[in-house]
Amino acid sequence: MKTIVCIKYVPDTSEAEVKVNPDGKTVDDAKFSFDINDADNYAVEESVLVKEDKGGEVDVLSIGPKQSEVMIRMAMAKGCDRATRVEDDRIADHDPLMVAKVLAGALKDQEFDLIFTGCWAEDDGHMSTGVALAEYLGINHASMVKKVEVLDGKVKAHRELEGGLMEVVELELPAVLTIQTGINEPRYAPIRGIRQAQKKELNVVNLDDLGLDPSEVGSEASLVVLENLYIPEVESAAEFIEGEADEKAEKLASILVKGGLV
Amino acid sequence: MMMRGMIMTTESQTFTEKYDLLGCIQCGRCTGGCPVTVRADLNVRQFVDDAYDEEKLDELARLAEIWDCTACHTCAVRCPKGLKPLEVLIGLRSLIVESGKVEPTVRDALQSVLLEGNPWEKSRATRQDWMEGLDVRIAEPGEHVKNLFFVCCTNAYDPRVQVTAKNMIKILNKAGVDYAFLPEDESCCGSEVFTIGEEGLFEMIVEDNTEFLNEFSADRIVTLSPHCFTTYRTHFPDLKLPVIHYTQLLDELIEEGKLAWTGELPKKVVYHDPCYLGKQSGVFDEPRRILKSIPGVELLEFDRSRERSLCCEGGGGKMWVESESKKERLAETRIKDAKVLEADIVAAACPFCVLTLEDAMKGLGYEEEMRVAEIMELLGELIED
Ligand SMILES: Cc1cc2nc3c(=O)[nH]c(=O)nc-3n(C[C@H](O)[C@H](O)[C@H](O)COP(=O)(O)OP(=O)(O)OC[C@H]3O[C@@H](n4cnc5c(N)ncnc54)[C@H](O)[C@@H]3O)c2cc1C
Ligand code: SF4
Ligand code: SF4
């Protein structure tokens, strides 16, 4: 069983105040701490659990800066075997499709059975990278997975839907599963383990090494343009529209038209 | 990021050698003094006996009660053979830590120490946010200062006890003391990392902090928390500067007549000896002299005081491990004892003691008639800006 786990290095914005820089397109990250994306931490644990159960290997794949290597070493200390870190300024990393394209490119000559990603990244919260990755690779996927059962040539994925409803799907391998938090209890990476993980293979590559054309994963290829970032104003006004469904729809439509919103 | 001192260590000692298990005469003084035996199944003497069998270690490590120890050190103080029975429990904890299968709260605290230099999952960049608006001097390597302050993660980040450091600055400025606080790259002293049993991380902290602190030129390091105080004194053999606790500095200033209190505090105050200040480091009288210097204060004593002081259960990593026992918490026992003494204020000189005792006091519903306070909190109210 060969598993790939995709992890992202993200800022923790729960403690420090989020401030937009004067350029209006970036956030002041001076006061943030950075760590593995929460859902990805569960994905790492799940990949190691699969390895412990079925044998095989786990490779880490991450696009991120040099500082993120501590996160990668921690994943290795937990049981992942080797890692690839892609670093290249030319990637339009605000666009999940471009990110997925790079991830897919990094995996194109590799054999694997499973790919785990987190179900979403806490920083930009698109919830689409994992699914897009499956699409680029032309393989099956299941999102929001809360339980994984690896079968012979297949995987049974339990997906948590709205309202806590569980859907169980069976997929042919290889497949991408986007892992939801709470699927397991991530273990601790002891320092001695991290030290030993320094010996494991970590390849740092750029787009050229991967044989990817920068113009296909850069801003010119991206359909997403980041116009402006701002902190939403907290407003307390809420209007409840009463009436039968068609009356409500009519009132709502007129509010939207009057407000110039449609 | 704390990744500076990544070197390999060799483990050749057996468990029995490391903890001198053959030295134990099974006298039972350790268990006889252990405060948590009244509420948990922990029998430390039995662990000292059983751990001799190396094949049993994994089984012992899986027993939940190894996490009940608060690292109060009563057992070590009482042992006639100079053993540290609690360290056997810490050694067993480290077997669990090495497997990675610790409580999520413990995992997160340890990881936060590694990545951010504090166990509270706060960003390193915000470590000095508490200083905002204060006239505080920051130390620079090479620039000599008499008193170099180490603030402690808990004092730096926990809004309840930040007052300790803030009031300290007020007093230092007022008394014209030559001092500076360490810059933002001050990192956790590792007190709780050690007692949780993350040996590798603790070794790294000892190495990194020694290197960091040795860059500064000072007469001494002044710690605000007894946990940092005792940890630096006992586990940092290569630290060049002597380390004292703030109560020792203030006691000196009072002795030299450099501190004058404005107003008075006509209250009955009982002093709670923090385990890490009293029984572990022998500082008993300075905090008492400080309290006695306050006009109006009537200083009371607990029956269990000084070396026999009852642990508040805030140490030993217990901030991150919930006890399974539903029996009365020791902090509650302590507050009830204070109530019997009719104390108005329970004073402590440790952030963990303040947090646990205050929690217990509120839980018992004594908020109207009783107050738990850091000594610095009381002093801050008695000094003019
Ligand atoms: C580490 C250790 C472990 C041991 N384990 C065991 C064991 O498991 N089983 C076993 O059979 N033996 C054991 N022994 C031996 C046993 O404890 C001693 O043989 C026995 O206690 C000796 O009694 P003692 O009267 O000489 O002194 P102690 O036992 O020390 O007795 C002192 C007590 O006697 C009383 N006393 C003494 N003098 C006076 C006085 N002038 N006036 C009034 N009261 C007085 C007081 O109450 C005082 O506390 C152990 C001994 C040690 C040191
Ligand atoms: S350190 Fe305190 S709590 Fe722990 S075993 Fe010793 S006496 Fe008991
Ligand atoms: S106090 Fe010391 S000698 Fe006595 S039983 Fe405990 S560890 Fe052994």
Image (cartoon, coloured by chain):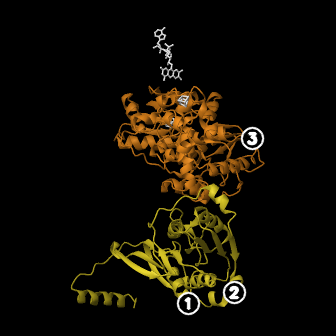
Chain colours: A yellow, B orange
Crowdedness near tag 3: few (<14), some (14–19) or many (≥20) residues, C-alpha within 10 Å: some
Rendered location of residue B72, percent (x, y): 52, 36
Amino acid on which the number 2 mark rests in the picture? Gly
Q: Report in which chain the residue with disc 3 lies.
A: B
Q: Report in which chain the residue with disc 2 lies.
A: A
- As drawn, which residue projects farthest toward the left? A244
Earlier in the chain: of badge 1 and badge 2, it is: 2
Crowdedness near tag 2: few (<14), some (14–19) or many (≥20) residues, C-alpha within 10 Å: few
Residue A211 badge: 2
Taking B113 as reference, is B44 above or below it?
above
Crowdedness near tag 1: few (<14), some (14–19) or many (≥20) residues, C-alpha within 10 Å: few
Taking A205 as reference, is B285 above or below it?
above
Residue located at (39% from left, 28% from top) = B341
Report how far apart the C-alphas of labels 1 and 3 lie in the structure: 59 Å
- Given residues A164 and B268, the one toward you in this image is A164
Q: Mark 1 sits on what residue?
A: A223
Amino acid on which the number 1 mark rests in the picture? Leu
What is the secondary structure assignment of the residue under circle 3? loop
Which tag is nearer the camera, tag 1 or tag 2? 2
**Would residue B383 be found to the left or right of residue A166 on screen?**
right
Residue B240 badge: 3
Rendered location of residue B262, percent (x, y): 53, 34
What is the secondary structure assignment of the residue under circle 2? loop
- Given residues B10 and B312, the one toward you in this image is B10
Image quarter where the N terminus of chain A lies is bottom right
Report how far apart the C-alphas of labels 3 and 2 lie in the structure: 54 Å
